[in-house]
């Protein structure tokens, strides 16, 4: 029991520390192991992804902390990530567990935290309000067309001047 | 003398053509190109959107990598998005016009629940990734490439436009009992002072995978 408690407090501290250093933990951060969903019910399926093993990198995963044992991470079909997954045992107790992956080539070890909770669905915070996804740039004058127009008018002006010049000289008009 | 006459005719021709095309370019370049907005026919029907109709079973969670909407020629990578300090959904950097994003702390597309994707309708240079979103028809397909190698295929139920004032948070972001997708961009009229008045929101549900 003591080890479990130490595991839990250790992970909680790690989460707190990570929260302080890198508040928005982004997908594919080179240093870490991304676990989705980060909070899962016993028996749930978990996907694990990391960018730490490079292009076409494979890795060996270890989810024995939560009782799921070893699993494999293979190169993703999209992008340069390495991904794999496992099922949390239905008998898993609520808590925070450290999931580990070791890159096959570099031997680099990356970790991430998995939260097992008994509440049936994680309740993500929903966004609120509208989204600022435009500035109206499609509505103004098109700079390329405007530049093209100015250039064409310059050609016309040059041609006209030349013709008038010849006419003034009485050349063949 | 004949050569010179031909030369003059050619110069005159080029001059007239340049004058016409220059005038046309300047005129059409100054026209406004407002993004398409959804019509009443694209709105949700009164009986709901046929919840459960040909809905596919949920996929296990997997982060998305790419979104494709063939009918409006969208094919864009997806980045993870967080919330802003005010609780609204953040947006991808405006400078990258063919980049969309998904709400990373929420549901992954294909999983049970409401997955959220957002992208710009335009940036300072002109149209961006979701410029034509308002023209998307009911029944159109939206494909999301997922990191586990699968492709989640969604079918559009409705395209709505909402004012930023009184934005229907629950309708747009709220939980769903089946795998659903929202695709959001700016819309609802534009004024130079306040920008776009609201958002175009596409409602879709999972109908297949491969």
Image (cartoon, helix red, strand yellow):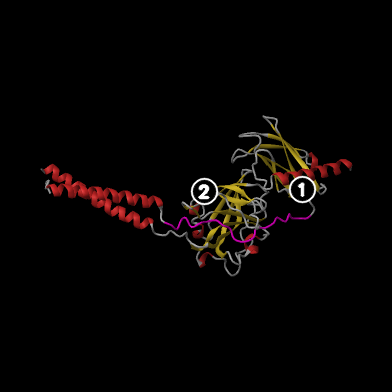
Residue A58 position by quadrant: top right
Q: Nearer the viewer, residue A69 or A114?
A: A114
Q: Which mark is residue B37?
A: none
Could you tell me which residue is drawn at 60 percent across and 52 percent down? B208
**Residue under numbered circle 1:** A115
Which chain letter goes with mark 2?
B
User: For the point 72% across and 56% down, which residue is it?
Assistant: A123
Is residue B145 found left or right of A122 in the rendered image? left
Residue B187 coordinates in the image, percent (x, y): 52, 61
Q: Which residue is mark 2?
A: B95
Query: In the rendering, at what x and y percent does residue A120 appear?
Result: 76, 55
* Residue A111, picture quadrant: top right
Quarter of the image that includes the N terminus of chain B = top left
Residue B33's x, y, as percent? 43, 58
Q: Is residue A121 magenta?
A: yes
Kind of element beneath mark 1: strand
Q: Position of residue A78 (x, y in %)?
A: 59, 41
* Range shown magenta: A119-140
Given the current orientation, which residue lies at the most extreme bottom position? Answer: B46
How dense is the environment of label 1, judged by Cα within 10 Å: few (below 14), some, or many (20 and up)? Answer: some
In what element is the residue under mark 2? loop
Q: Is residue A130 magenta?
A: yes
């Amino acid at each position: 029991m003591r080890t479990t408690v130490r595991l839990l407090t250790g992970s909680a501290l790690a989460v707190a520390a990570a929260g302080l250093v890198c508040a928005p933990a982004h997908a594919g951060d080179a240093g870490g192991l991304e676990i989705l969903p980060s909070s899962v019910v016993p028996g749930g399926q978990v996907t694990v992804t990391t960018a730490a093993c490079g292009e076409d990198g494979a890795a060996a995963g270890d989810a024995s902390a939560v009782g799921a044992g070893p699993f494999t991470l293979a190169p993703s079909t999209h992008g340069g990530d390495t991904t794999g997954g496992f099922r949390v045992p239905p008998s898993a107790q609520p808590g925070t567990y450290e999931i580990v992956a070791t890159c096959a080539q570099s031997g680099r070890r990356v970790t991430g935290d998995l939260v097992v909770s008994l509440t049936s669905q994680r309740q993500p915070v929903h966004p609120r309000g509208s989204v600022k996804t435009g500035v109206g740039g499609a509505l103004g004058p098109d700079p390329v067309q405007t530049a093209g127009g100015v250039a064409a008018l310059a050609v016309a002006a040059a041609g006209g001047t030349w013709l008038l010049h010849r006419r003034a000289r009485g050349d063949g008009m | 003398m004949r050569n010179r006459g031909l030369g003059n005719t050619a110069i005159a021709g080029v001059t007239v053509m340049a004058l016409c095309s220059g005038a046309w370019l300047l005129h059409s370049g100054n026209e406004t190109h407002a993004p398409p907005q959804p019509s009443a026919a694209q709105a949700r029907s009164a009986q709901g959107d046929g919840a459960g109709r040909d809905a596919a079973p949920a996929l296990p969670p997997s982060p998305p990598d790419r979104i494709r909407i063939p009918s409006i020629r969208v094919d864009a990578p997806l980045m993870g998005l967080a919330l802003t300090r005010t609780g609204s959904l953040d947006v991808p950097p405006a400078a990258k016009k063919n980049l969309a994003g998904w709400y990373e702390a929420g549901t992954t597309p294909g999983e049970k629940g409401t997955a959220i994707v957002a992208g710009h309708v335009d940036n300072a240079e002109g149209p961006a990734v979701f410029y034509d979103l308002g023209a998307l028809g009911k029944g159109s397909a939206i494909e999301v490439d997922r990191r586990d190698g699968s492709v989640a295929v969604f079918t559009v139920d409705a395209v709505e436009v909402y004012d930023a004032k009184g934005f229907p948070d629950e309708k747009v972001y709220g939980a769903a009992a089946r795998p659903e997708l929202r695709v959001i961009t700016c819309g609802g009229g534009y004024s130079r002072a306040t920008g776009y008045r609201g958002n175009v929101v596409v409602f879709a549900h999972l109908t297949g995978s491969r």
